[in-house]
């Protein structure tokens, strides 16, 4: 039955597919794939509240949800932007991080949300966890710079930019040329030092 509903959606019969998906969910509330499909249909039709509820239910019911499911849920919560949505998104991201480990994209979104909430120390700890799991990189140093800039800690942001430049200098580039982003990071550093 779900295949038939998917076919309807592919053929442009979205309203009928949505109605059928809702009926399938009512008849078989524990059938996780129907919940995931209904969530996507709701999301595509602009019904964010319903989409979020269905995706939450899917994650709770699915035998093995994927990190992408948690990421989608967090992104939908971010887009809805209700009073508690960012905190709720971070909670779901943290559940996924505990379950799947230091998945970079999950941590990146959590850092972004925590900065919006003014939780800069927590955001920095997330970057530290990524560095511990993987290794220092210019990207992680620039994430630190972003956090420090958001917090108004411009001297620390400049130091993070210096770290990014130093790590870039360790990387080899074709023909021994300097990495083209190096100069923009130095300008960013100088801008932070001037503040």
Image: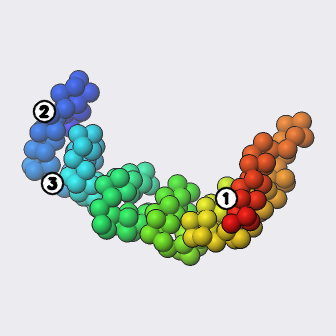
Using residue 68 as the reference point, say whether residue 180 is left or right of it: right
| Quadrant location, the C terminus | bottom right
The mark nearer the N terminus, 3 or 2, is: 2
Does residue 51 sit above or below 146 in this rendering? Answer: above
Please tell me the numbered disc located at residue 123: none
The mark nearer the N terminus, 2 or 1, is: 2
Count residues near mark 2 (Cα–Cα under 10 Å), then give few for <14, some for 14-19, many for 20+: few
Count residues near mark 1 (Cα–Cα under 10 Å), then give few for <14, some for 14-19, many for 20+: many
Residue assigned mark 2: 16
Q: Position of residue 4 (x, y in %)?
A: 19, 31
Residue assigned mark 1: 142
Residue assigned mark 3: 29
Which element is circle 1 on?
A: helix
The mark nearer the N terminus, 3 or 1, is: 3
Query: In front here: 27 or 117?
Result: 117
Residue 146 visible in the displayed image: yes
Task: Report if the CB atoms under discs 3 and 2 are less than 8 Å apart.
Answer: no
Q: Residue at x 49, y 73 (%)?
A: 119
Q: Position of residue 176 (x, y in %)?
A: 90, 41
Query: In front here: 23 or 118?
Result: 118
Q: Residue at x 48, y 72 (%)?
A: 118
Q: Position of residue 124 (x, y in %)?
A: 59, 71
Residue 34 visible in the displayed image: no
């Amino acid at each position: 039955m779900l295949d038939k509903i998917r076919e309807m959606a592919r053929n442009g019969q979205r309203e009928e597919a949505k109605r059928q998906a809702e009926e399938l969910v009512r008849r078989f509330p524990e059938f996780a794939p129907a919940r995931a499909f209904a969530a996507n249909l709701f999301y595509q039709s602009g019904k964010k509240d319903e989409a979020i509820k269905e995706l939450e239910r899917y994650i709770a019911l699915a035998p093995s949800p994927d990190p992408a499911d948690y990421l989608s849920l967090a992104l939908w919560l971010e887009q809805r932007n209700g009073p508690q949505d960012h905190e709720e998104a971070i909670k779901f991201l943290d559940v996924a991080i505990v379950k799947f480990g230091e998945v970079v994209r999950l941590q990146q979104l959590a850092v972004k949300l925590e900065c919006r909430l003014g939780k800069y120390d927590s955001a920095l700890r997330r970057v530290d966890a990524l560095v511990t799991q993987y290794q220092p990189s210019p990207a992680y140093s620039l994430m630190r710079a972003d956090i420090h800039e958001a917090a108004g800690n411009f001297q620390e942001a400049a130091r993070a930019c210096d770290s990014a430049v130093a790590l870039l200098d360790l990387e080899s580039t074709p023909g021994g040329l300097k990495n083209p982003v190096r100069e923009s990071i130095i300008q960013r550093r100088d801008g932070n030092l001037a503040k």
